[in-house]
Structures are given as structure tokens and as C-alpha cells.
Amino acid sequence: MTIWVDADACPVPIKQMLFRAADRVGVDVVLVANHPIAVPRSKRVRFMQVAPGFDVADNAIVEAAQPGDLVISADIELAADALAKGVAVIGPRGEAFSAESIRGRQVQREFMQTLRESGVATGGPPPLGPKDKQAFASALERWLNQYQREQREKNA
């Protein structure tokens, strides 16, 4: 199983948590971006650089991810595509996306896009705070615990 990271917009503290988890649990982490990103020396962490362009990294993640993998992204469309493929998705603020929740998030995204296009200044998300980091750590830990249970069952 692999954790795929939409690394262009993933906050550094989230990447650091993923790096520690990779070695601790023995799961592969792949950061995907269209510009170079430093990764620690680890046989479990690697970087995949893709060509520049709109959604190129997202498309590479969806293409490579397999059911049972995890995607880390705040991109709602990437999350929807990954979920449709049977891949789990967690946002960097700890939201575990699901087939039930993703449509509401898509509608919200479309509404905000309409507001921006009509000239309303909507602002971006607030900076990642301690509660966000804790929520992400908890969501990641739940996924890793499930991964470890499946590994034990597989090897039993």
C-alpha cells in the first residue's frame, strides 16, 4: 500500500508527519509535484516529478493509486476521482473524504468558484493551525492502524 501526496499544496508539517509514519509503519509515501521537492533519505519516501500543467500531478496520482492506497490532498476533484477508484482520501486538515461527503464538497467548491467569478473576494483557507495538525494526525493514525491490521491478517 502506498500513500500518495498531492505535494504542490501540502503543508510542510503534514509532509513531516507522513515521513515519520513511512519509516515507523513501513508504508511507502510518494510525493507528486511539478517542481522539485526535498524528501528525506528513506527507502520508504520518494518523489515523483511530473510535467507542469493544470491537473497533471492530480492525474498522475489518480492513475497510479490503487484500491487500498491513501491519497493526501485538499483538491476536491482529485479526492472524488480517487474515491471513485476505491482509494481512501484524507485532506491536510484531517477530513477523511467519503463517497457520501464528497458530493457536498463538490457543490460547495462550485458555489465558491461562482462567487469568485462574479467578483466576490472569498479569501483562501486559514493557515494550518494546531487543531488542523492534530485532526490530520488522528485521521492518518486511524488509516495506518487499519493498514497494520490488514498486514497482520494477510501474514497470519
Image: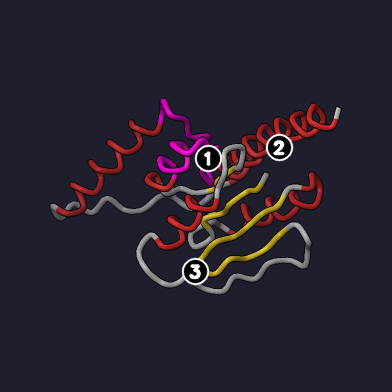
Could you tell me residue 3's position as x and y percent? 63, 48
Give the residue drawn at x 33%, y 31%.
104
Considering every residue shown, the one lying at the far right of the view is 156
Marks 3 and 2: in contact by CB < 8 Å?
no
Residue type for callout 1: Val
Graded by Cα atoms within 10 Å as few (under 14), some (14 to 19) or many (20 or more), the crowding at tag 3 reads some
Residue type for callout 2: Leu
Residue wearing tag 1: 89
For marks 2 and 1, give the CA distance. 13 Å
Residue wearing tag 2: 144
Q: Earlier in the sequence, mark 2 or mark 3?
A: 3
| Colour setup of the view | secondary structure
Q: Earlier in the sequence, mark 2 or mark 1?
A: 1
Would residue 93 be counted in the magenta stretch?
yes
- 99 vs 65: above or below: above
Q: Please identify the quarter of the rendering in which residue 1 is found.
A: top right
Residue wearing tag 3: 50
Region in magenta: 79-101
Residue type for callout 3: Val
Would residue 138 be counted in the magenta stretch?
no
User: Which disc, if any, is residue 119?
Assistant: none
Which one is in front, 138 or 123? 138
- 68 vs 5: above or below: above
For marks 2 and 3, give the CA distance. 27 Å
